[in-house]
Image (cartoon, grey):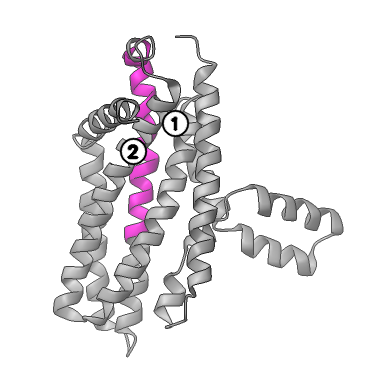
Amino acid sequence: MLKSLSPIRTIAITTYKELIRDRLLYGILVAALLVTSATFFLGSISLDQDHRVIQNIGLASIHIFTTFILIFVASNAIFRDIERRALYLLLPKPISRTQYVLGKYVGLLLLLLTTLVVLGGFFIAGGFFIDRSLILGTLMVLPYSFLEISLLTALSILFASFAAPLNASLYTLAFFIIGHSLGSVRAYLDRFGTPLAQNLTAVCYYLLPNLDKFDIRQAVLYGMHISPAQVAWSLLYWLVYTGLILGLAVLVIQKREV
């Protein structure tokens, strides 16, 4: 068991060290810190809504910029291995495709977790001096953001296993937009759409990733109760969906000629 985990750990650490040196990563991080700082100013000039403005815009910006890092930085991880022929050196060794995919996945998660910790820590530090009620909401939202981003990471690996980096990035971005639009589109078509459109939307709703299951920002913002059953369902949904996507990525990479 431990011997099978060693290649995963090695690949994960190598991936993390490679990506943490990417200049684009730091450009996005600086932009994210600037936007997060601006939210405190916007909150100060709002009319009796400073808490909600800061929390809503701040947490949304952290989530979006971390997703940008996934889309524009992490999507190149597998392509770089193929381009530099590192994949051709790794796979003939006693490293399975499953270990390779899981290693890249864990390495990418380490990068994205670092990003969330940096941006979330900066936001919490600002909340400590401006409005300490922001801290609890941030600590509740960030784990859900990590679940959503980790699911998108699995999708990004799947797309990168058969597509060029730009295409993989666009596919991941498309699923990010679709995942947050399925509920609204379905509600609209259930009311105004034709039966065919309703049926097609229902199929897409259950087959495509519904990222709204990981969005609790509005619930936290308005003090709505989140039951343990909702938390358990979100975790189960993430586990099953992410497992299936990574399994597909392994199957695709197994078809590659190495």
Evaluate whether residue 167 shows in this view.
no
Q: Kindly give the residue lying farthest to the left in the view shown.
A: 129
Which residue is disc 1 drawn over?
A: 166
User: Is residue 245 magenta-colored?
Assistant: no
Choose between 245 and 222: the one closer to the eye.
Answer: 245
Q: Kindly give the residue lying farthest to the front in the view shown.
A: 1
Question: Mark 2 packing: few (<14 Cα in 10 Å), some, or many (20+)?
Answer: many
Q: For the N terminus, which image quadrant?
A: top left
Residue at 63%, 64% (x, y): give it: 184
Choose between 41 and 233: the one closer to the eye.
Answer: 233
Residue 8, image quadrant: top left
Answer with left or right where residue 203 lies relative to residue 131. Answer: right
Residue at 30%, 46% (x, y): give it: 112
SS for callout 2: helix
- Looking at the picture, which amino acid does disc 2 mark? Val
Residue at 42%, 20% (x, y): give it: 96
Label for residue 106?
A: 2
Where residue 42 sits: x, y (%)?
A: 27, 75
Residue 94, image quadrant: top left
Magenta highlight range: 62-88
Distance (Cα) linking label 1 and label 2: 22 Å
Instruction: Work out whether 159 lies above or below 229.
Output: above
